[in-house]
Image (tube, rainbow, N blue to C red):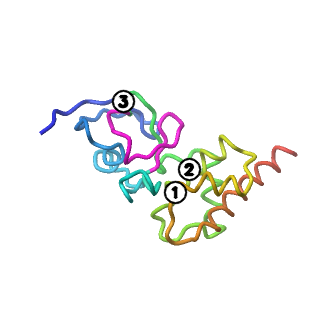
Amino acid sequence: MAELQTIRLHVNGQAHSCSVPPRMHLVDMLRNELSLKGSHLGCEHGVCGACTVEVDGRAVRGCLTLAVQADGKHVRTVEGLADFPDSRALQASFVKHNALQCGFCTPGMLLAARELIQHKPDATREEVREWMSGNYCRCTGYHAIVDAICAVLAQRNQESAA
């Protein structure tokens, strides 16, 4: 058995110290060690986006990131989004536009959409589709997801123009 490594990180604003195997993935540590079940394991190859979390403000695939790579970093999961106005706006828009059905992909979608809103607030509908193309959804057909994100972008642009 591999020797455990102690890592220290902040997850959703709280400090944690965990002893993990060197090859444990970040999403496994979050789910199994910290009981944060919002990030899901889908493909386990970094393709579907269900495992998306933020590390130091960047969306990353939790199934491709080792837990030891998060040592000393700030990690945010879908459970930690409630305190952010952009996240609340996205969640409300997803509900309004019926942009979630089974909910399996929704945490990854919300984190990817949040990064989009922060880094590309003037994104066009086509740019939203391109940005979100790394997150798979088997239920909604993507139109509702794109509608929800575009609605938040439009609202933000109206507020900043006023």
Estimate the spatial distance between the alpha carbons at disc 2 and disc 1, rounded to whole Å.
8 Å
| Residue closest to the far top | 72
Name the side, left or right, on which 79 lies relative to 84: left
The span shown in magenta is: 52-69
Label 3, secondary structure: give it. Answer: loop
Residue 108 within the magenta-colored segment of the rendering: no
Callout 2, which amino acid?
A: Ala
Label 2, secondary structure: give it. Answer: helix
Circle 2 crowding by C-alpha within 10 Å: few under 14, some 14–19, many from 20: many
Residue receiving disc 1: 135
Callout 1, which amino acid?
A: Asn
Estimate the spatial distance between the alpha carbons at disc 1 and disc 3, rounded to whole Å.
26 Å
Residue receiving disc 2: 112
Name the side, left or right, on which 122 lies relative to 144: right
Q: Earlier in the sequence, mark 2 or mark 1?
A: 2
**What percent of the width, then of the height, locates residue 127?**
69, 52
> Which quadrant would the N terminus be assigned to in this image?
top left
Callout 3, which amino acid?
A: Asp
In the displayed structure, 56 sits above or below 54; it is above
Name the side, left or right, on which 26 lies relative to 150: left
In the displayed structure, 10 sits above or below 38; it is above
Circle 3 crowding by C-alpha within 10 Å: few under 14, some 14–19, many from 20: some
> Disc 2, disc 1: CB below 8 Å?
yes
Residue receiving disc 3: 71
Q: Earlier in the sequence, mark 3 or mark 2?
A: 3
Residue 56 within the magenta-colored segment of the rendering: yes
Estimate the spatial distance between the alpha carbons at disc 3 and disc 2, rounded to whole Å.
22 Å
| Residue closest to the far left | 1
Label 1, secondary structure: give it. Answer: loop
Q: Residue at x 40, y 56 (%)?
A: 40
In the displayed structure, 159 sits above or below 74; it is below
